[in-house]
Image (cartoon, grey):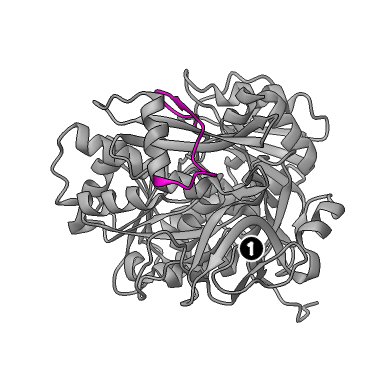
Amino acid sequence: MLNNATVLNLAMILEQNATTKPDATAIVYGDMRFTYKQLDDFANQVANGLKSLGIEAGDKVAIACPNLPYFPFVYYGILKAGAVVVPLNILFKPREVAFHLRDSDAKAVFVFEGTAELPLAQTVKQGFDEVDSCKHFVVMTANPIMPTSIEGAMTFGQLIYDKPKSFQTSPTNPNDTAVILYTSGTTGTPKGAELTHLNMTMNAIASREVFLPFMGNGIDRCGVSLITLPLFHSTGQTAQMNASIYDGSTIVLLPRFEAASVLSAIKKEGVSFWVAVPTMFWTLLRHAEENNLDVNDIAETLQVTVSGGAPMPVELMKQFEEKFGVRVLEGYGLSETSPVACFNHPQLPSKAGTVGQPLFAVQIACVDDDDNPVPTGTAGEIVIRGHNVMKGYYKKPEATQEALRNGWFHSGDIGVFDEDGYLSIVDRKKEMILRGGYNIYPRELEEVIMTNEAVSQVAVLGIPCPKMGEEVKAFIVLKQGFVMTEDEMIDWCKTQIASNKYPRFVEFRDSLPIGGTGKILKRALREEIG
């Protein structure tokens, strides 16, 4: 018997284009091409395979995979089966794998076999073996017809063998959980943000509408989106993969970010749209400068780039735009907001140093410690409400209540709205340095230090100080060919930064720790400090 319950499944964004433009190219990986119909066929086989394993609607299924075609095959297959996708960071150690599988109640896990440098399947299997509730281990081999050496595992080829290429997608409701994205854990134990089919579908649609001029309109032309951000991360997953699949655009996958590979892919595939984190822009810029590359032709195909995931230093943005002749648009979001919440809309003037204005049907405010709105131009905690906000943290009602109090998601970030409604991210609330009673925001200092011609990268942290409570320390990477002493850098900072805020300590390094999503890992630096 049929009923009139509202049905929404994120996988429907794929099914729409598999029907209307089945022969259009959906995925490009090296020399391989997959049409929308082929992508949908594989996803249907995965869904049928999961049902044969006893996976039911609402069950959790994890995936640990680099940016390979396997990821969308499995991702949409899990959704079609009515199950919940739990993406895993491919850099996790066995202990971390075990935590995420156990905390999410995963019933199965898909794992790419990996390489000699990154034996992914072996690592994940060690964590899997510690979790009794996770019963199925599926290995995605480089050659789908080859067996796996992982004991007790089945291969992707075995799972989908003889499975039908048709499947009636599970009739999930808009508020059913589609994906559980785990927070980075920078403020404690990672928490699983439950993102619904409505959250993820609306964020893909809203992102597509923002990026439409650069992605194609799905009818007359097709944009080409290069994905170098890991697909297990919310930005690559929603703002690129899901938004592109909804649009009917072509996705070019790179499993590893390398400057030369990015430039080659842009030229070869006619990439029009690229989203990255600031460290990727920095690496691409340094590569072009140090190798004296002529990159004038990049702007002929690449129409816009987007920076997200971490604040983009204004000086870096200016240098990149001048070198490549390509506009950089900065946005803002979190795992808990699906992720996009705010963006410098392409049809409006950009303001360097801001993340633009709220996304369609998303409301953002800055509030004080009592959750009262602060005046324009005043710093306050960023709070968000709208279709993009998670329904809560999985199995953590107290943390959910704290984060979603008074009907708003409390981000923990400090922001300022200007008179035109553009939002600037001042800093993480918990990264704020309290020195002698003064609030100091590391982002502000990092922006200033980046204007020094010798500085390539910087991370500012607070370190314990018996007298002042905390002191300011800057970890700095110098550009190639520049030499500077720590005292010289401190003296320069004194001329640029207020006396109560400039770094009293500077440490030069050859590099800064970078996480799997390309962000500078301040947590790793803090652990060194102790």
Q: Is residue 225 visible?
A: yes
Q: Is residue 18 left or right of residue 383?
A: left
Amino acid on which disc 1 is placed: Gly
Residue 185: image location, x then y, percent: 68, 40
Q: Which quadrant of the rendered structure holds the C terminus?
A: top right
Whether residue 508 appears in magenta in the rendering, the answer is: yes
What is the span of residues highlighted in magenta in the rendered image? 496-513
The picture quadrant where one finds residue 255 is top left
In this orientation, which residue lies closer to the viewer: 383 or 305?
383
Identify whether 217 is placed above or below 463.
Answer: below
Residue picked out by circle 1: 380
Residue placed at 57% from the left, 61% from the top?
Answer: 415
Residue 158: image location, x then y, percent: 59, 34
Secondary structure mainly formed by the magenta segment: loop
Residue 148: image location, x then y, percent: 57, 23
In this orientation, which residue lies closer to the viewer: 53 or 511?
511
